[in-house]
Amino acid sequence: MGSDDHYPEEAPTHRVRVDAFSISPTAVTNDEFADFVAATGHITVAERPIDAADYPGAPQENLQPGSLVFTPTDGPVDLRHLSQWWTWTPGASWRHPEGPGSSVKRLGDHPVVHVAHEDAAVYAAWAGLSLPTEAEWEYAARGGLDGKPFTWGDEARPEGRIMANTWDGLDFPWRSTGESGYLRTAPVGSFPANGFGLFDMAGNVWEWTDDWWTTHHPDDAGSPCCAPSNPRGGDLEASYDPRQPQFHVGRKVIKGGSHLCADSYCLRYRPAARRPQMVDTGMSHVGFRCVRRSARTGLPLLSTAGH
């Protein structure tokens, strides 16, 4: 797991073991999520009323159901300030991915977005499945290629071929060349599968895992015999964002990068890449997929196994 060559939170590279499991070949789609909502009546976090006490100092206009939507800028901006291209959009939800007036009517085979961790976990439980741990997700994403930077090998674009739905060009967040054919999400399975037959383990949407965020990985055990089995990240208290102490909200690890990953800004469409995401916050580029663990793990099998 991990990488010593890119962002600090991915280090150090270390060995782990995971028991047998299976994983969905694609992220959960809008059609699949709609079936779940129809069967259960589930109301997602983005659709529920907001308690102002949970968000001290938040502008009144933001205290209504909604979610964060990517909004391209008019030109180059300071890339240190995400607020310039993320807009809190009342009415945005999985049903309305770009806000009121938008719809998933023609996006049934696209990954569902604007789902908080709770929404993903409830869906998984309804389906008799689970959300993956970070170790399971990363093992699956590598597709049998140990130590390679990308799910398909060493080069971002082997022989010029576009391998994932990521930001085209260097002018993020205001101008994309459109080479991939998509400016936002793409139908699942639009790009080549990895060695395990899994689609979109790089790009398209970030995906929830069930592990609490840690700022770095543990050191390597030093010997294969001593590698930890089925590791489970950090804990709730350590996952809080120290830069925003007013928000006492835990953060889980998300993996895989998204259609907004640009080589000039966010080279995170790699198996080792990881980011923290507040559990109550869905966004227009965050989705999920599920796993089934073998009976011998004692935990709640779809398409890959290993250790």
Image (tube, rainbow, N blue to C red):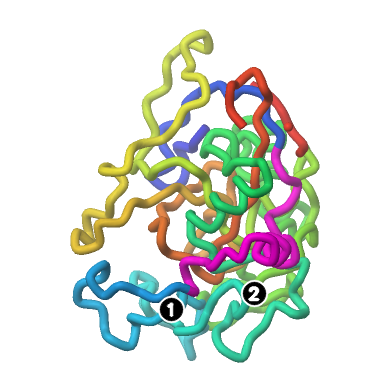
Q: Which mark is residue 113?
A: none
Task: Determine the residue located farthest toward the top in the rendered image.
Answer: 225
Q: Residue at x 43, y 64 (%)?
A: 281
Residue 165 in sight here: no
Q: Residue at x 46, y 75 (%)?
A: 68
Q: Along the horizontal axis of the image, is 238 left or right of 76?
A: left
Find the magenta span and give its range: 23-47
Q: Which mark is residue 184?
A: 2
> Is residue 298 placed above or below 131 in the rendered structure?
above
Is 214 in the magenta? no
Q: Whole-percent x and y of residue 78?
A: 36, 77
Q: Which mark is residue 65?
A: 1
Q: Whole-percent x and y of residue 164?
A: 70, 59
The residue mark sitting in front, 2 or 1, is 1
**Mark 1, other Cα within 10 Å: few <14 / some 14–19 / many ≥20:** some
Q: Whole-percent x and y of residue 246?
A: 19, 63
What SS does tag 2 mark?
loop
Q: Quadrant of the C terminus?
A: top right
Q: Amino acid at mark 2?
A: Arg
> Is residue 261 placed above or below 155 in the rendered structure?
below
Q: CA distance from mark 2 to mark 1?
A: 22 Å
Say which quarter of the image contains residue 181.
Answer: bottom right
Judge by depth and name the residue closer to the eye, 290 or 168: 290
